[in-house]
Image: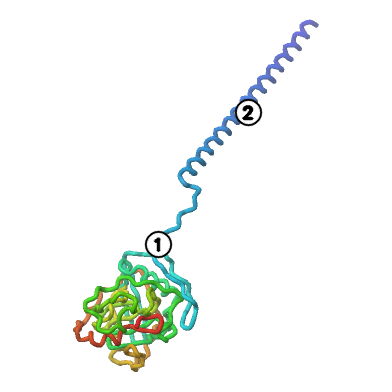
Amino acid sequence: MASSKSRQRALARAKTERQIARRAAAARRRRQWQAGIGTAVVLALLVVVVVWKTGGFSPAPAKAEDCAYTSVDAGSGVTDVGKPPTTDVVKNGVKTMTIALGQGTVTAKLDPSKAPCTVNSFTYLAGKKFFDNTTCHRLTDAILQCGDPSQTGSGGPAYRFPNENVPSPTAPSSDPSASAPADAPATGNALYPAGTLAMAHSSQPDSNSSQFFLVFKDVQYPADYTVFGTITGGLDVLQKIGAAGNDGSNQAGGGKPNQEVKISSLTVTDTAPPQAEPVPTTSASADASASASSAPSASSSSKS
């Protein structure tokens, strides 16, 4: 009887010891888990402090704009297709502009390193098919002027932008009407050789838009037009258009081409064009006397 009670007490004591051991193990695991959570919280707080100290929670700084495209009010002749991007503008390499005319194809090499904002604008407008199915509205004995969907000489997109890469003057301007506005410094004249691709603009400052001119004969104009490319193919096409003449209707010189010159498509690609074709040389002095009355002109989108 006594032996049986001793065994029962031993079993009870062993059970109690096992329970105590299990409780101790559970408490140990709980302390370890709590310690791990505490360490994770401390580390997370440290990370937050480091990120905050290094400006990680500050808004990303706005990128500086590479180009300034100023909106204009919608009006007669304005075709609103939005504005080109003003950041991350390409400033190197070359692009190819291809103009499909009824008379043939003209290609040009565009130079973003010299006129990045102009090339950026042309690339944007070409992507919007802005020039497709438009008619070149003005021809002189040296240039063909295009880029106005309204065909009035005053049309363009709903933005304007400043000059860049204007040529250096080579001679004093002989006619104020062919130079800068009266409140701007005198520019003098510069030679625009055959094969030049340049922007036209109004007498207002920073008024480049979409109108451009292609030079097929050496000519002197005010040194106030952005040169943004070189014709690499189709110069003979332009010269034949020039030989067909114009109706003389433009007061600034030249007029509507006698042959309709329609752009079926104008594209800009990132590939380099073929090597430029030889450009016939012409006496610049022979064109100087006529340049004042034939400079790229329009009432509000290209310079008079």
**Closer to us: mark 2 or mark 1?**
1
**Residue lying at 23% horizontally and 82% vertically, measured from the top left:** 218
- Tell me if mark 1 has few (under 14), some (14-19) or many (20+) residues whose alpha carbon lies within 10 angstroms of its own: few
Name the residue beneath numbered marker 1. 88
Tell me which corner region of the image, top left, top right, bottom left or bottom right, holds residue 98. bottom left
Residue at x-position 37% and y-position 69%: 117
Residue 237 in sight from this viewpoint: no
Q: Quadrant of the C terminus?
A: bottom left
Q: Residue 282: horizontal and vertical position, in percent? A: 20, 83
Quadrant position of the N terminus in the picture: top right
How far, Cα to Cα, is label 2 from label 1? Answer: 56 Å
Label of residue 187 in the image: none
The correct choice, above or below, for 198 with respect to 259 in the image is above
The local crowd at label 2, few if under 14, some if 14 to 19, many if 20 or more residues have their Cα within 10 Å, is few
- For residue 30, the mark is 2
Please provide percent x and percent y for residue 22. 66, 22
Going 38% across and 87% down the picture, which residue do you hit? 137
Q: Position of residue 129 (x, y in %)?
A: 44, 77
Do we see residue 301 in this rendering?
A: yes
Q: Residue furthest top?
A: 2
Q: Amino acid at mark 1?
A: Asp
In the displayed structure image, the side of residue 17 where residue 255 appears, left or right: left
Secondary structure of residue under mark 1: loop
The amino acid on which the numbered mark 2 sits, given as a three-letter code, is Arg
Kindly state the secondary structure of the residue where label 2 is placed.
Answer: helix
